[in-house]
Image (cartoon, coloured by chain):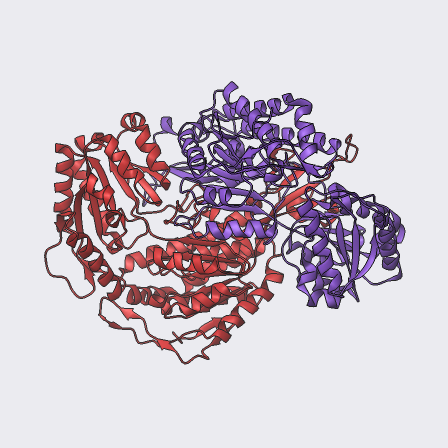
Chain colours: A red, B purple
Amino acid sequence: MITGKNTIGNQSSASGTATFKTFNPVENKQTPWVFHQATTDEINQAVQLATEAFQLYKNYSGSRKAEFLNTIADEIEALGDDLIHTYVAESGLPEARARGERGRTMGQLRAFAALLQEGSWVEATIDVGQPDKQPLAKPDIRKMLFPIGPVAVFGASNFPLAFSTAGGDTASALAAGCPVVVKSHPLHAATGELVASAILKAAEKTKMPNGVFSNLNSSGISVGQELVMHPDIKGVGFTGSIAGGTAIYKLVNTRAVPIPVYAEMGSVNPVVVLPSALKEHTAYWAKQYASSITNGTGQFCTNPGLILGVKSEAFDQFIAALGQEIAQITPTPMLHPNMLKAFEEGIDQVVSSQQATLVGAYNGEAAPNYAKAKVLTVDAQVFIAHPMLHREVFGPYSMIVQCDNDAQLQAAIESLEGQLTGTLLGNAKELGEKDSIVEALKEKVGRLIRNGVPTGVEVCAAMHHGGPFPSTTNAKYTSVGVSAITRWVRPVAYQNWPLELLPKALQNDNPLKIYRIVDGIHTSNTI
Amino acid sequence: MITGKNTIGNQSSASGTATFKTFNPVENKQTPWVFHQATTDEINQAVQLATEAFQLYKNYSGSRKAEFLNTIADEIEALGDDLIHTYVAESGLPEARARGERGRTMGQLRAFAALLQEGSWVEATIDVGQPDKQPLAKPDIRKMLFPIGPVAVFGASNFPLAFSTAGGDTASALAAGCPVVVKSHPLHAATGELVASAILKAAEKTKMPNGVFSNLNSSGISVGQELVMHPDIKGVGFTGSIAGGTAIYKLVNTRAVPIPVYAEMGSVNPVVVLPSALKEHTAYWAKQYASSITNGTGQFCTNPGLILGVKSEAFDQFIAALGQEIAQITPTPMLHPNMLKAFEEGIDQVVSSQQATLVGAYNGEAAPNYAKAKVLTVDAQVFIAHPMLHREVFGPYSMIVQCDNDAQLQAAIESLEGQLTGTLLGNAKELGEKDSIVEALKEKVGRLIRNGVPTGVEVCAAMHHGGPFPSTTNAKYTSVGVSAITRWVRPVAYQNWPLELLPKALQNDNPLKIYRIVDGIHTSNTI
């Protein structure tokens, strides 16, 4: 049952008078539930409890935190179809997506649990002391990673599960040893409440300290603003728009004590089509890309919003084929009427600039809140001269840039802002020959993809889902995959510390059996 | 021969009209050389050359960059006594310190060269693809670290060699594959020019691209400001005051595209004296700390500026003994008359607040620019209530905080800002018993030291020289030790990339024989 209340540690709370509802885009009407926006007092309580919980939680063993994360996954599953139906009602996304995203969310939690069980993620580095070294004794120095403290996580509109309440930011912060205060996304507050209840159940079952997790409702920006400015919040995870993420980043930078903001924001995910990809695979790639552009109604951070190629008969054929494919994609709902409005306004701005021409669009009728996919094309010279054409239009849309030659293609790539991904379609021989184009693309992105589509981000250790600004605020960190844990930690070194008082990860007999760097050597041996 | 010119790539340049001189604090007069401040054109030229050099330098092998770094070390040594005498003239520091710091600087360069030769620092992480996996193929994903681009480095006043022109920031950035533009410290521009000439010679000998290094003279703040705001500068390394570092950090945050600023700033390096340390070692610790407080005329970022303990007869004896030791420390010169002025004003502010009382001070005469060491003491209640007393006074000075009990000691620690180091004097048994005090200190610092002095920062893999704000702008990174290289890189992942086109570190046969994480396992095996 949805109560509409905030979750402040192990209590439900609805002391505020401001309320809001979520919206069912398929039925084109509000959902039945009434949510109470968190008050300043409730925000402060949540952070206060998180700060107290941190004193205990930060010292819990990897096994104990792993048990917590695994139990969260179990409890999310135990929510059953209630969660699926609520997700579908609040997002307009199909049930199969809901089930897939639930599986991904549980998989992420379990992946972090496995990382904790293995234990080497703390990057234990040891230089054994040499008290008799001449002319000076060499001190014994040992460092490892420790959690930074309570973290604020912003739920994302487009991933009500995998990038929200118990999503990658929350899972990675809890894994690191940081309590989490979630600012729930206003578009799916009921989904958020259900997931919060699962986290709370897991916290109780595994005897976690009260305050290790809280969930705050909010319909506007004030709750998030207050949360990130709270002096006891030590880090921020955000997934959303460039405007939203940049605003939070700038606000946080006004704090007396700066804290890290890991905002994963917009990206047009450029795709470079090389001639070798078009020799035999024109129809294949046209179909693949029509599908990738419209997948999830185009509401993915890795949506391919930009396709670049050198003018040729084959490229013309690809463009025509993609246009035909796009025209056949039946509209699907966007997450909210406001998103459809922003999508249509975004395309209108491009069209009314009279710089780009239509390649293909769905031309039939569409139900309210359903988006008609569209692909436009522009000459590279015009594209380079008009940064407005570089912007992400969130939804089922892509822009094809036609270049005169490789030099102009490279110039078009160099004119781009930072991106999450960059894709090259072509055979290995051609990739090897066009290394300056590959290199130009690499400088702009966090992940290079060959012969694929950017949508679909594998959750694994080698994944890097993060790129130069404005795709993120910090290109050094990923928000997908187990490396995301490193966002919430900092190293502390112990010098000449009593061996028996060192954390287990730094002890001579290596009781956790982890990989460490000892006197410069990677090893899991004892000392 | 000192020319007073800027080093812009492989050219000397002095196109500006603004000039300045450095100062010999021992002789209390200006040095003979005239330095030309870099103009806007010269700054732009240096960054332009660095950007061009990056296109080549970023792809150089670890061996080739190692050869460059080792040759820089050789060329610094080849400067011989010229460098030592210039260093001493511009800093007032003794010749032994100059020779020691030269050795440290060369050692750092060689340590990074060894790191490059070993090669595992790129954190190669590989998840091998499973094209036949059901229900979906698992893509092949491989990531490693790549350099971010040209880096601006600010020379530090207090380490004319080890934290300046070819110091840790420059060495780590060059090791990472990033060209460096140094803003030379105005107090030791001649030392900087000599070291720059050594780097230039090494660059020529090892055939590095023109622009891999530049050195800009500057007497004020404008050159540094222009440099960090240049759109092609991708990162900043700084060592200096909280005011200076914070100003640069705030300025950089106004850039359209934010870049990382690694500023290592001020710290009072709290030292907690536990009763067990005072039983037998009062005289020993008093002597050790009198020496640490006045080492290098107190001009170290790890200077112990704060000593805390619980009131007792033994603590009174320690305070008295430290006061007596301090009174016997013969004054030594500060780096510049302005630094002595700031030191004296800082102490005057504390004294005139009438909150603290004198424990000990050198009472004899001192030559111009020579600093008289001083130790004050204050009651913990007063200390906690007056943040002014928490501030670093750069120079041979420390404040002793007297606490009523352990709870107040903990409260005093919790009232502190972030610090580079925290030290505990005491036996292992007592450390184990007072874990809440240890834990409180740990939350404030980047390095915990037992039974030692904070001055003297070992250069090794396990060192962490970085702590919570304001001791640094980013507590996740160190400026000492080989881990400092990670400040200048970001990961890029390759998805389904042709195996033969992957960087060597990611290839199946592991030609560099480095440690990698392959399918979650730490290994140096081939795939």
Q: Please tell me whether residue B202 is drawn above or below residue B52 in the rendered image.
A: above
Find the residue positioned furthest to the top. B205
Q: Tell which of B85 and A12 is nearer to you.
A: B85
Q: Tell which of A173 and B362 is nearer to you.
A: B362
**Quarter of the figure with the N terminus of chain A:** bottom left
Q: Is residue A368 left or right of residue B113?
A: left
From the top left corner, tell me how far across and down residue B226 is, in percent. Answer: 46, 43
From the top left corner, tell me how far across and down residue A314 is, in percent. Answer: 14, 33
Q: Is residue B303 left or right of residue A124?
A: right
Find the residue positioned furthest to the left. A364
Look at 36% across and 53% down and name the residue there. Answer: A265
Q: Please tell me whether residue B236 is drawn above or below residue B13 in the rendered image.
A: below
Quadrant housing residue A60: bottom right
Quadrant housing residue B477: top right
**Quarter of the figure with the C terminus of chain A:** top right
Q: Is residue A326 left or right of residue B12?
A: left
